Amino acid sequence: MFAIINTNVFDGKTIQENQAIFIENDLISRIVPMSAVSTDELPQETFDAQGLLASPGFIDVQLNGCGGVLLNTAICKETLETMNQANLKGGTTQFLPTFITSDAESMVEVLDMVGAMDDRLQKGVLGLHLEGPFISTEKKGAHREEFIRELDINTAKYLADNADKICVLTVAPENTSQEVIDIVRNSGITVSLGHTNATYEQVDEKEGLTMATHLYNAMTPLGSREPGVVGYIFDKKPHAGIIVDGIHASYPSVRIAHEMLGEQLFMVTDAVAPAGTDMTEFDMAGLQAYVTNGKCHYKDGTIAGSAVTMAQGLNNLIDHVGLSREEALRMATLYPAKAIKVDNEYGLLKAGYKANITLLSDNNEVKHVYQMGKKAF
């Protein structure tokens, strides 16, 4: 057992001042005011946080790469380990390695690789986010058109058989039958709508789409006569991720989305290799890409992921969107945990929850990080 003392604790609702967090193995055993702690009950291993704010570790549900690596271009355990180390510096303790549209062989390879990891939870990996290849060519964004295809029954069954490795599957609902959606979602995989050219009605006729991938981007916009996918999301209010870099969506657009969706809206990075580095060029799943003034893009200007971190996004939510510190933290912790149905173990600092803790300064600089009960940064 060890303890973090003299820390202010964000408990998911409010900030409780001058607390002590006791951790046993990878779990929080209790959180109590320092006034209720006697010196003789403190364990030998004790860290004095000196007034830093303890937040749940950030959870990134859409992370293609960071720290100079991209999952699609290097399908190996070392890539995930590099991503995890880069994440920790930005306060992220859990993530969904995101594998974008590829050939069938590569998808099998990444599933086998994750399946062979016996320590993936300790490395922050909650499961894969397969973003494609079952998407719309009209809204492919940075994805390679030659690999886009429809989700057939046999492939849906294969994905369901590998549900222990997959957390989220992004599909274009207009190209995906209800039968295959049911096969996938009944296995426990969250089915997210994204990279879609659907009308409101085309999405509304499908059931089981409980999430939306990077709101506003690669989807039909809200219109006066055709509500589009954005209109569907605002109306039906599934969980929705949003990239808060000021590039993928303007800050007023993020604010409007938050007013519409409340706790259903959570923050993602959609980061690629340059995140956390000073790279100016990179390989985006077989295509040359560039970084210009923080924007990741192809030569023709098409956006190709982001270079933002969760910690940077947190400050953007506070400084530019106008959210309270507490609500911004929820968008980085509790709300993504709810979206992928792990909020019984992650996303809160509470007795019985996994000990994933990000210690922040008053200006939200990441000072220390504990991951699954171990000091990691």
Image (spheres, grey):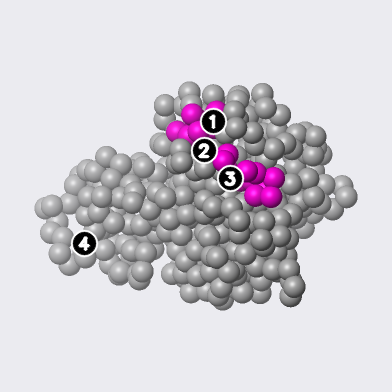
Q: Quadrant of residue 231?
A: bottom right
Q: Could you tell me if residue 327 is visible in this image?
A: yes
- Looking at the picture, which amino acid does disc 3 mark? Gln
| Amino acid on which the number 2 mark rests in the picture | Ile
Q: Which residue is mark 1?
A: 157
- The residue tagged 4 is 32
Q: Nearer the viewer, mark 4 or mark 3?
A: 3
**x%, y% of residue 305?**
70, 49
Disc nearest the viewer among 1 and 3: 3
Does residue 75 appear to the left or right of 280 in the view shown?
Answer: left
64 to 258, vertically: above or below: above
> Which image quarter holds the N terminus?
top left
Q: Is residue 118 left or right of residue 350?
A: right
Q: Residues within 10 Å of mark 4 (few under 14, many from 20)?
A: some
User: CA–CA distance between discs 2 and 1?
Assistant: 7 Å
Decide: marks 2, 1 in contact (CB < 8 A)? Answer: yes
Q: Which residue is mark 3?
A: 178
Earlier in the chain: of badge 3 and badge 2, it is: 3
Residue type, label 4? Val
**Alpha carbons under labels 4 and 3: distance apart:** 49 Å
The span from disc 1 to disc 3 (Cα, nearest Å) is 14 Å
- Where is residue 55 shown, x and y percent of the image? 40, 59
Q: Are marks 2 and 4 in contact (CB under 8 Å)?
A: no
Q: Which residue is mark 2?
A: 183
CA–CA distance in space, label 3 to label 2: 9 Å
Residue at image location 84% in from the left, 53% down from the top? 301
Residue span colored magenta: 158-180
Dot 2 or dot 4: first in sequence order is: 4
